[in-house]
Image (spheres, helix red, strand yellow):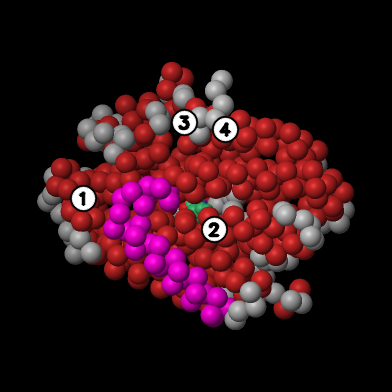
């Protein structure tokens, strides 16, 4: 395909908004708090932050570099940059991960729509904390989650079919800043609840005795999941970034925004969890069981509840489109399908898997755990190895510095991380976490 025919992001802000839109989503607001709750709080946060900086930024920048230099989808990029070599399998694994993630992620996104609906009809009103918790559990036993799932898949399809600039970029630019604002307001309400300080302590005070190999692996998996790295989403988005943009700067900005939102979600949720006596390890229902209780306790709760769940759905859709785009770009460029056919085929096949994920908690858990904690770290490992040891210093520097136009002052630090620190750290955490080695 001719490079000039490819769609691209129109502006610097558009690039950051789209990539941050992919990164920021249910991973930050739904997954991060409950995984942190299950893995001991402050100590998890500390390990998480270390991984975000030391591994997350280098992997993200490597993905942008691969995508922008090849101008192709996740599989095609490796074929183009390493012809005849097995590196393309990293892309194939990424496309596989995209199917798995989209299937369970869109189920959770569907729950969000139910909560929008409940907010509209004022369904939480007058309910106790216990009743709100039961509402979530009952809802999951009905067929409603599957219907919402299907609706959410179709919303995703609608945006992706419209293309990169007129679909993805247009929506993310406006909606992400509003989400940040509302999260700040909810956090303020949460920390001003009586008894909230325990929650802040849980979130920020590291108790090192809680750190186990599994906690460390969960932190790594969460970092990959939240930053949308390790499976070619940002290779694909990188291929739509224009040659004049600053990749390093983009990676750092996106990572900072993503981390800020995750920590803010923690600040919104944990003080309330402790103030209301909800167990912090309330699994995947945590956000859905706590936040409606907070909304009941604040002036204007009706409005906040509505706004919050609408924005959560928006944050989710800017992520689901980025996952679907991995599949669509692959189908359309490598298998020569039209964009329209590729989008429909992707949607339908994910749809089938998602129905299982929606009805069966087991399938849901397997997809959730395997994608985040296994496929993404393994994918990330090969991505940094590719850049560090195959693509090499010269070509990587040329891409990151825009052929010498930018100074890229931290390039040597980046290369060191990519060659040594990130691969060794990922390999150790991974093997230790799945129990293959012990130290
Ligand atoms: N990063 C997204 C979130 O936190 C989820 C995601 C994972 C998107 C992997 C793309 C790829 O919600």
- SS type, badge 3: helix
Question: Taken as a whole, is the magenta stretch helix, strand or loop?
Answer: helix
Q: Which one is earlier in the sequence, the residue at label 4 or at label 3?
A: 3
Q: Which is closer to the viewer, label 1 or label 4? A: 4
Q: CA distance from mark 2 to mark 1?
A: 30 Å
Q: Dot 1 corresponds to which residue?
A: 137
User: Which residue is more in the foreground, 377 or 288?
Assistant: 377
Q: Label for residue 96?
A: 2
Q: Visible in this render: residue 336?
A: yes
- Gap in angstroms between the C-alphas marked 1 and 4: 35 Å
The image position of residue 35, as x and y in percent, is 40, 39
First reached walking from the N terminus: tag 4 or tag 2: 2
Residue 178, how many percent across, how many down? 44, 58
Which quarter of the picture shows residue 352? bottom left
Which stretch is magenta?
339-368
C-alpha span from label 3 to label 2: 24 Å
Q: Residues within 10 Å of mark 3 (few under 14, many from 20)?
A: some
Query: Which of pointers 2 and 1 indicates the residue nearer the eye?
Result: 2
Query: Which secondary structure, mark 2?
Result: helix
Q: Nearer the viewer, residue 123 or 3?
A: 3
């Amino acid at each position: 395909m001719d490079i000039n025919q490819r769609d691209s992001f129109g502006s610097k802000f558009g690039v950051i908004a789209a990539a941050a839109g992919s990164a920021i989503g249910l991973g930050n607001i739904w997954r991060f708090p409950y995984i942190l709750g299950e893995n001991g709080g402050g100590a998890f946060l500390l390990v998480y932050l270390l991984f975000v900086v030391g591994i997350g930024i280098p992997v993200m920048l490597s993905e942008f570099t691969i995508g922008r230099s090849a101008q192709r989808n996740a599989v095609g990029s490796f074929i183009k940059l390493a012809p005849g070599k097995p590196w393309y399998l990293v892309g194939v694994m990424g496309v596989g991960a995209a199917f798995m993630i989209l299937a369970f992620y869109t189920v959770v996104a569907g729950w969000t729509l139910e909560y929008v609906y409940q907010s509209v009809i004022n369904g939480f009103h007058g309910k106790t904390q216990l009743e709100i918790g039961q509402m979530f559990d009952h809802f999951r036993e009905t067929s409603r989650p599957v219907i919402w799932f299907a609706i959410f898949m179709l919303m995703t399809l609608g945006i992706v079919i419209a293309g990169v600039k007129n679909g993805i970029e247009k929506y993310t630019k406006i909606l992400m800043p509003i989400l940040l604002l509302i999260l700040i307001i909810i956090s303020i309400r949460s920390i001003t609840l009586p008894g909230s300080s325990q929650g802040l302590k849980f979130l920020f005070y590291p108790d090192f005795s809680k750190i186990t190999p599994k906690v460390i692996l969960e932190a790594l998996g969460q970092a990959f999941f939240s930053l949308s790295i390790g499976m070619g989403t940002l290779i694909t988005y990188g291929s739509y970034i224009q040659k004049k943009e600053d990749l390093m700067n983009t990676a750092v900005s996106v990572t900072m925004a993503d981390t800020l939102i995750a920590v803010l979600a923690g600040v919104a949720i944990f003080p309330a969890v402790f103030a209301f006596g909800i167990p912090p390890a309330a699994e995947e229902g945590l956000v859905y069981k706590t936040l409606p209780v907070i909304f009941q306790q604040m002036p204007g709760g009706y409005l906040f509840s509505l706004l919050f769940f609408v924005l959560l759905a928006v944050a989710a859709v800017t992520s689901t489109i980025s996952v679907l785009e991995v599949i669509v770009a692959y189908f359309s460029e490598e298998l020569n399908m039209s964009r329209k056919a590729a989008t429909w085929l992707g949607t339908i096949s994910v749809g089938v898997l998602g129905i299982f994920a929606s009805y069966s908690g087991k399938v849901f858990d397997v997809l959730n755990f395997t994608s985040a904690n296994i496929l993404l770290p393994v994918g990330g490992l090969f991505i940094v190895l590719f850049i560090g040891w195959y693509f090499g210093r010269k070509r990587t520097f040329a891409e990151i510095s825009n052929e010498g136009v930018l100074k890229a002052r931290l390039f040597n630090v980046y290369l060191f991380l990519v060659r040594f620190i990130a691969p060794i750290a990922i390999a150790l955490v991974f093997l230790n976490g799945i129990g293959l080695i012990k130290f």
